Image (tube, rainbow, N blue to C red):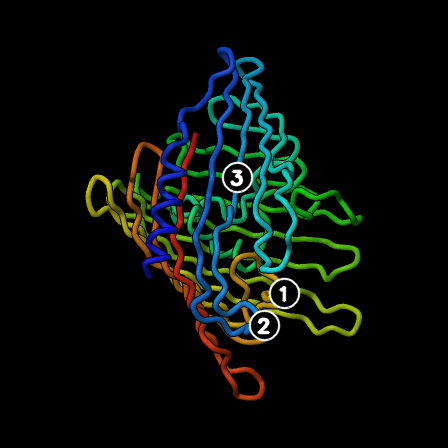
Amino acid sequence: MKRLALLCLLFIGFSATQSFAQITIGDDATLSGRVYSDYYWMAQHHNEDIDGKNGFWFRRIYMTYNRDLNESISTRVRLEMNSAGDFQSGTEMIPNVKDAYLKWQNENHQILAGISSSPTFGLTEDVWGYRSVEKSPQDLYDFGSSRDFGLAFKGRLGQAGDLNYHLFVGNGNGNKPDVNRGKKVMLSLGYNLTDKIVIEGYGDYNSQTNDPDSYTAQLFGGYESEKLNVGALYSNQYHEGQLGLSAQSLDLVSVFTNFKINDTTKGFLRADHLFDGYMGGSGNSYIPFAEDVESTFLVGGADFLLADQVHLMPNIEAIIYGKNGQGISPDTDIIPRLTLSWEF
């Protein structure tokens, strides 16, 4: 415990010496950054090769350049890099393109061309509020990508602007190159019932050449205020059968909250349940899942504001598994972490 405490103090001390001011480059451009980092400990894990491992890593480092080209047209380029998170690679962090788009906008509508945010879990992530701690539920279980390459149309409708839409026609391969003849169509419609309560329906169709086509439908409700955020999600994803493989339907539910304790302290809690096996979950970066069994993911912690835009967040994640076909449940995963997030 003494060694862990010393490592945490060194981690905090090193990071707190950084500068946290956004850089303005001329009157129309800015350069900014964001960092998510952890000290993690796999205190208990169903995979014996990972059990007991601990260390430091960067889960995300973003560098973002924004520039206004005129009153209605702007552009963004964002680079991302991170530690491998697979518990075996020794490769160095290599930047890749996260965002690269040209945007036209007027008072109520936008058109984006290039790599930009998808509508799959943007609102969920905003209400959850702790991407620095963990991905949104749909992102964690690979129900979709946070980015895609294509054309996006988004804005507000109605006299009061209470109806929000986001239509995206993209490659369906995230920010990677297009590798098939199909395309992915995504649409979200959100409605503000009050200034604090929002509901959103979402659907997509992903046509793929070498993999089964998939369909996603989900419903989300959120409450946002200065002192309390609450969210509830149901999502279903259906994969067609192909080449001897049976069709698969995945059901995901999630509830979460974050709440203000005082001016410098907040708390957060979340529970997700996947009613089916997480195919490919063993390769999930930073938090590998057991496959072929139902799983309940839990995370909770506190958020301490050390300085403007600097957050220290001790938290603990756990994954509780159901029984597999042989009636055996994998061991529960327990992962204490000390997360540090800052912007500059």
Determine crowd level at label 2: few under 14, some 14-19, many 20+ residues with C-alpha closer than 10 A. some
Between 157 and 234, the residue placed more toward the observer is 234
- From the image, tell me which residue sits under label 2: 291
Q: Are marks 1 and 2 in contact (CB under 8 Å)?
A: yes
The relative height of residue 198 versus residue 1 in the rendered view (above or below) is above
- From the image, tell me which residue sits under label 1: 280
Instruction: Give residue 331's position: percent from left, percent from top.
Output: 47, 77
Q: CA distance from mark 3 to mark 2?
A: 29 Å
Labels in figure, total: 3
Which image quarter is the C terminus in? top left
- From the image, tell me which residue sits under label 3: 61
Element carrying mark 3: strand
Q: Earlier in the sequence, mark 3 or mark 1?
A: 3
Instruction: Give residue 328's position: percent from left, percent from top.
Output: 52, 85
Name the kind of residue labelled 3 in the image: Ile
Which image quarter is the N terminus in? bottom left
Q: Earlier in the sequence, mark 1 or mark 2?
A: 1
Q: On residue 32, which mark appears? A: none
Between 36 and 327, the residue placed more toward the observer is 36
Instruction: Give residue 92's position: percent from left, percent from top.
Output: 63, 45
Element carrying mark 1: loop
Q: Is residue 278 left or right of residue 4?
A: right
Residue at 46% of width from left, 20% of height from top? Answer: 23
Instruction: Give residue 41's position: percent from left, percent from top.
Output: 44, 61
The relative height of residue 277 versus residue 142 in the rendered view (above or below) is below
The relative height of residue 315 versus residue 330 in the rendered view (above or below) is above
